[in-house]
Amino acid sequence: MRLMENIIKSNFFLDLRGIACPLNFVKTKIQLEKMEEGEVLEVLLDPGEAIESVPPSVIEEGYTILSQIPAGNYFKIFIRK
């Protein structure tokens, strides 16, 4: 998965570590709505509830998770609009 991180180029970035659910999903969704089709958003999320709930919610909204990478004590997810 680390190789994938080097290949995926994000257009936008959100650091949502320390942001409680559901606010982290709301902030992700608002950013995605501002983006153009095909653009990529990189989001940093805490382990636990954030990483367990945000990716499925994003997929349910019709977006694509390109990659989900553990990065020490947080996760990086790459989402394509």
Image: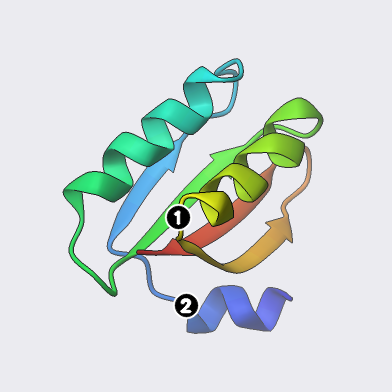
Q: Quadrant of the N terminus?
A: bottom right
Amino acid residing under circle 2: Ile
Find residue 73 and report its horizontal and vertical position in percent: 78, 37
Circle nearer the N terminus (1, 2): 2
On screen, 31 above or below 70?
above
The answer for how far apart the CA atoms under marks 1 and 2 are is: 9 Å
* Label ID, residue 42: 1
The structure residue drawn at horizontal position 61% and vertical position 19%, both measured from the top left corner, is 21
Question: Residue 9: percent from the left, percent from the top?
Answer: 39, 74
Residue 48 quadrant: top right
Given the image, on which type of amino acid does mark 1 rest?
Answer: Glu
Instruction: Pick the residue in front: 36 or 41.
Output: 36
Q: Is residue 13 left or right of residue 43?
A: left
From the top left corner, tell me how far across and down residue 67 is, in percent.
62, 68
User: Could you tell me residue 51's position as x and y percent?
Assistant: 71, 40
Q: Secondary structure at mark 1?
A: strand
What residue is disc 2 on?
A: 8
CB within 8 Å, label 1 to label 2:
yes
> Does residue 14 sit above or below 8 in this rendering?
above
